[in-house]
Image (cartoon, helix red, strand yellow):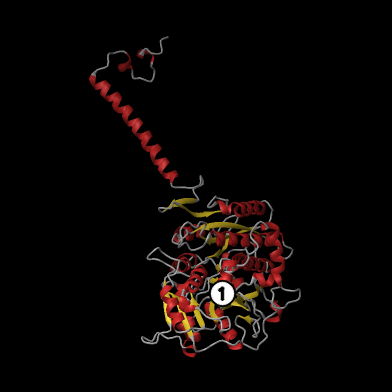
Amino acid sequence: MNGMDRRNWAWLPGRLRFRVLGLIDVVALWALVAVLVGAGAWWGLDTYQEHRDYCTQDQELRRVGDGEECIGVTAAAYPFDQDLADVLGRIEDENEAARESGKPVVSVAVIMPYSSRTPGAAMSKDLIRHSLQGAYLAQLGHNHGPATGDTAVQLLFANVGEDLSHWRTVSAELASRRDGESPLVAAIGLPNSDAATLAAVRRGLGPARIPAVSAVLSSREMEHPYLLKVSPSTDQLVDALKRYVSANKVNREDTFMIADERDDNYVANLRRVFREEFGAQYGITDDEVQRRTETYQGIKGPAEGTPQIFRRAVSAMCAVGARTVFLAGRDADLPPFLETVDRTRSCDRGPHDEPMRILRVSTGRDPVTETAEMRAIAERNNLEIVTAAAVDAPRWRAARSGDEQVPKAFALFADSYDRYFGEEKNDALGDGYAVMYHDALTAVGTAVVAARDSGINPVDHHDVYDELRRGSPLEHCAAGCVPGASGVFTFADESTGTDEGARHAAPTGLWPVCKPVPVVTFPKELRSRSPLYRTYQEQGENTCPRP
């Protein structure tokens, strides 16, 4: 049988098998072929374009923007950045172990950027990695610790982009994960005090009733009933500085303030608080003739203009002989500020002159600042940098056993960090992010255990939110304090007892109670004459348990 004989083609209509094809038949046949080929090509191109936009086959992460960041939520170790491969892999393994443990599993999202490609990115690569490392250690502590009940925690990587702008996509996905086998019960992270973070809570997580526990937010502008903060507020950090300068000899006349002029929540709030706490008493004014303030453009934020230009501000500061300087800016701006001081001739002073004290606040002790180069600049220019911080890991590591200012849980945390991430630099804990992310997840885990101890099964996001708000520091934290590596703490619901008619104007966020605020000096380690500051504890009181 000749396969090329058209008369043997069973699929071809009989009238075409046994007659010579006419023009109409040929046109119709080619039209059919064209339709089939076109449909196949359209389907293939459409499928390609659809899948091309996704970073993963399960379509959990989607490429967005010119930088094609992979935005979304996943429990798998997607290679956002090669520097994160180790910690992401460890968390993925622990997620799988949690799901196979036979315990009830709850999910907690880690909301933050997972890449840092531009100078104005919300977080540096080191901060991202350290944050995830801290969250991993808290996950291990919960899943394998002796006092965490019969639940296990799965972490979800929730990437909102390096500028935090993709919160809508992430919030919608998290809202859809509140039910199921591993229900989402909370989110942690939320690293920057800016409009995108606040919108993510006000218009995303809050309406979905998902509690958000930020590790490092400190601006008082970041208020919402579903936004809890592990960090002391800017007001409390500056108050700790005020107690320091009151107890130590600090010049109150030759003062100056240099402030980041960007209009984001953090720096705007810090400028305001510095003026409120120190302005009248220390002469920080905007007087047109005798002004004692100058501004600069910080590195964080959109690339508009040239950031970190301190020449004018430093020249003005030194021209008036300032000895006490309030620096209202972010950690990343401190090294170029110090370098500018070093290059400015009008700042020269003798070794026997009173040092210039630079007062600032921070999450931790920035390792970039405390380098040999920065130490040499500080010593050469007779500078003393005084920082109110949430974490003082170098001092806590070096402290003698029994030092009551060192958090009880820090030693165990530091040992675990060295065990799992010993290849990191010795100062990796200095920035405070690993400690604070650990404590944020520990707070959620403590709430999960409290709900289970109350007989709740399964635990959901409503239960975790209720437990987070119920802690009390009284009676040695018998009512649910968090054993954080940065100190024992619980949360204060400042809206409690507020008249409903005035609720909209009152603080509605939840801030940590009894959180220690150490004051750090550089390049010399000086012990403050004032007692350890504890948030919400009045000076002279002793209502908080040992940290």
Task: Tell me: 296 left or right of 436.
Answer: left
* Residue position for label 1: 380
Determine the image quadrant of residue 437: bottom right
- Expressed as whole percent of the image width and height from the top left, the position of residue 218 reads 53, 74
Q: Residue at x 38, y 13 (%)?
A: 4
Residue 103 against residue 48 in the figure, above or below: below
Q: Looking at the picture, does residue 56 appear above or below residue 381? A: above
Residue 336 placement (x, y as % from top left): 49, 69
Quarter of the figure with the C terminus: bottom right
For mark 1, does the 10 Å Cα neighbourhood hold few (<14), some (14 to 19), or many (20 or more) residues?
A: some
Q: Is 300 in front, or is 80? A: 300
Residue sitting at the far left:
23
- Residue 306 in percent (x, y) is at 40, 66
Judge whether residue 371 can be spotted in this image.
no
> Relative to 443, is 358 on the left or the right?
left
- Residue 248 lies, with reference to residue 299, above or below; the image says below
Which residue is more in the foreground, 215 or 294?
A: 294
Q: Which residue is the extreme one toward the top? A: 1
Quadrant where the image shows the N terminus: top left
Q: Give whichever of 317, 365 is nearer the camera.
A: 317
Residue 228 figure quarter: bottom right
Q: Does 328 appear above or below 372?
A: below
- The amino acid at mark 1 is Arg
User: Residue drawn 50% across and 86% down?
Assistant: 278
Residue 385 is left or right of residue 64, and the answer is: right
Q: Is residue 77 visible?
A: yes
Element under label 1? helix
Q: Is residue 177 left or right of residue 32?
A: right
